[in-house]
Image: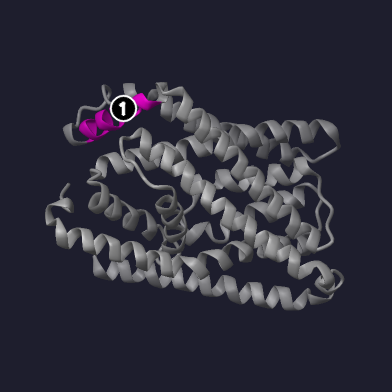
Amino acid sequence: MPGRIHKKRLLSVSVLTLFLAFAATHLTYHLPELNKVTHIAAPFFAAMAFISLVTFFLLGQAQRIIFGIFNTKVGRVESFSLAISNNFLNYLPAKAGLVARGAYFRALHAMPVQRYVAATAYGQLLYVTLAGFLGGGLGILIYLQDAYPNSLWVITVALIITGLSASVILGFAPRASTWIRKTAIRNRLQYFSTSLAPWRNFKPMAVYMALIFVILNLMATRLWLSFYLTDVRISAQEVLFLQTAAAASVAFSFLPGNLGLREGVIVGIGHVLGLPLDLTVTAAVLDRLSALVVTFSLGPWLAHQLSRKMVRQQSTSPRGYDPKG
């Protein structure tokens, strides 16, 4: 197990290092294009970083709603801290933030592992559902407005299928437990099915979906600013389509922080939309860097503060944290 963790950490560090090296090389090579907008580059990038900060705050509030539905109350500042530290830890190694956050909830909120997994999966499925259907609808509108290659239609259908698949999992999970004979798996599915009862709680779910919609639009605005910095003009529909497709790609991510996959989706679909390839790569890199600035500026400190809080809780109440729970 330690060897496996070491390999994952090594992979994560390697991917992050390669991305930063690529970003530095690419931006240096395209410096002439960026120099055209030097007078606005700094304030625009600052605005992008601020949008990233606001996005993390809203993401924390959205997660706060999900955990609240699962009978776990989280403070506003606490949820914001968890959102950034979770994102930071997901880079080293990949998905480490999910494990660390689970340990935190177990120690500080006595939240059983199964309930934590159910809440996390529930929130992710809703996120992918909204991103998939919204992206599919935007893809149809864009496709009908202009002459685009058939590959755009394929991408649109793929987004709709992704959203539909996530919604089907949400809808049929309560019945799936009755189809499984193996006791251990059936018990886990039954727990997840019971946890899905909050689906009937309309008000918090409506607020959650509204927050996710705002988050997607904020991230689309940040992406639009990155295109503007590269002197590429892109419509609101197109940039939101790119963002929803990148958001839906979370369902297929196995790399640290979704690093590389998001950029690949933006560049690939941008090429289908007729955007300049090199400048689209530059825009995707700038978009990522604006998020990394916030993540690596606040993430280490917030992760340290939360870990200290968890250690204090464990020392005063050892029974509050049980790895077997």
Residue span colored magenta: 185-198
Work out which quarter of the rendered image holds the N terminus and state it: bottom left
Horizontal side of residue 181 vs 142, given as left or right: left
- The main secondary structure of the magenta stretch is helix
The answer to whether 183 appears left or right of 115 in the picture is: left
Residue picked out by circle 1: 193
Horizontal and vertical percent for residue 276?
81, 58
In the image, is 322 to the left or to the right of 5?
Answer: left
Residue 110 vs 286, above or below: the answer is above
Picture coordinates of residue 100 (x, y %)?
Answer: 32, 58
Report if residue 216 is visible in the image: yes
Q: Nearer the viewer, residue 70 or 315?
A: 315
Q: Quick check: is 187 in the magenta stretch?
A: yes
SS at mark 1? helix
- Of residues 124 and 217, which is closer to you in this image? 217
Q: Is residue 75 magenta?
A: no
Residue 24 falls in which quadrant of the image? bottom right
